[in-house]
Amino acid sequence: MMEFNFKIESGDFTNAGSISSSVKRALKQLNVDGSVIKRTVVALYESEVNVVAHSHGGEVVVNIFDDCIKINITDSGPGIPDIEKAMTQGFSTASPEVREMGFGAGMGLPNIKNNTDDFDLKSEMGVGTVLKFVNYFKA
Amino acid sequence: MAKVAEIVEKLNLKLVAGNEGLQNVITTGYTSDLLSDVMGNIKSQSVWVTMQTHKNVMAVASLKDVSAVVIVNGYAPEDDLIEQSNAEDIPLLVTEDTAFDISAKIYELIK
Ligand SMILES: Nc1ncnc2c1ncn2[C@@H]1O[C@H](COP(=O)(O)OP(=O)(O)OP(=O)(O)O)[C@@H](O)[C@H]1O
Ligand SMILES: [Mg+2]
């Protein structure tokens, strides 16, 4: 088993994607199936960007087992008031500046759901959001 | 199969960075300015046509194994996007054409 820990700063768009890139490299070295790698990096990238764009900052814990990868993304708030609404394709509270950069299509959470085998999103207002997902290496 | 070098030459695209990737193969393309849309829908070995000019473009391009990025309307790529293109060896190309026009021209070449 391998464990990796990363921090994410709020508003740090220039580094968004660097965690996904490290995990992609690690999975490639382990000869994980290409389609699993692709799905995992899509989900992780969208998770990274959400913490950068919508939260006060957070951290990512990646655990790679023989048969799966488990990723937990935790942030320190403000939280998501209505998870069902947030999961709706097209729903976004992104600021105009963030939209101008091409974020804020409201497709990130749906992308994460579509690219993971197990998906669990929980949030408490004033505390933070915890997103956990798992991808298995064999179907 | 078309290579990046071919569309650069035939469509007179300006090669800004990522020269090492000129032999990348292009089998299809995707035209969009919404990063999550590209993240969710672009296929590998694509040419990505966009008006976005900031560094995250290369993060997405690299994670999705994109063959080349074409920036439209003559917009200038930001410096850290240029650096990242060289780091990833993914060619960064600029055209004066609109997204519609250049997508149509690329399609004609690779179809
Ligand atoms: N970690 C988070 N903390 C607080 N709010 C969040 C968080 N993640 C998502 N949200 C909320 O859920 C909405 C939908 O998220 P989603 O990722 O689907 O779209 P987006 O980030 O707005 O746009 P896109 O991902 O397409 O660039 C966000 O606009 C935001 O309101
Ligand atoms: Mg998002």
Image (tube, grey):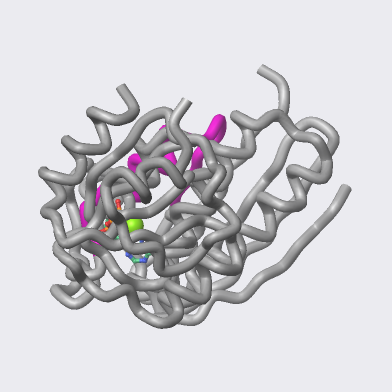
Q: Identify the residue at horizontal 20%, vertical 40% (top origin).
A: B103
Q: Residue at x 56, y 44 (%)?
A: B23
Single out the residue that lies furthest toward the right: A1
Question: Left or right: where does residue A85 sit relative to residue A6?
Answer: left
Vertical placement of residue A57 versus B95, above or below: below
Where residue A100 sits: x, y (%)? 18, 70
Query: Compared to A85, does B72 lie above or below?
Result: below
Q: Quadrant of residue B77?
A: bottom left
Q: Residue at x 35, y 75 (%)?
A: A78
User: Which residue ends up furthest to the top in the rendered image?
Assistant: A139
- The residue nearer to you, when weighing B56 against A118, is B56
Q: Is residue A109 magenta?
A: yes
Q: Is residue A109 visible?
A: no
Left/right placement of residue B104 relative to residue B65 reads: left
Give the camera-side residue of B103 and A116: B103
Q: How many marks?
A: 0
- Ligand 2 - quadrant of the structure image: bottom left
- A54 in relation to A116, above or below: below
Residue A56 position in % (x across, y down): 41, 80
Q: Is residue A93 visible?
A: yes
Position in image of residue B41 (x %, y %): 35, 36
What residue sits 63% from the left and 38% below the top?
A: A37
Based on the displayed image, in which of its 4 quarters is residue A82 positioned?
Answer: bottom left
Residues in magenta? Answer: A102-121
Q: Residue B102: x, y in percent? A: 19, 45
Q: Tell me, yes or no, whether the highlighted magenta stretch contains residue A101.
A: no
Of the 4 image quadrants, the one containing the C terminus of chain A is: top right
**Vertical placement of residue A106 versus B75, above or below:** above
Report the front residue among B3 and B51: B3
Q: Is residue B89 left or right of residue A63?
A: left
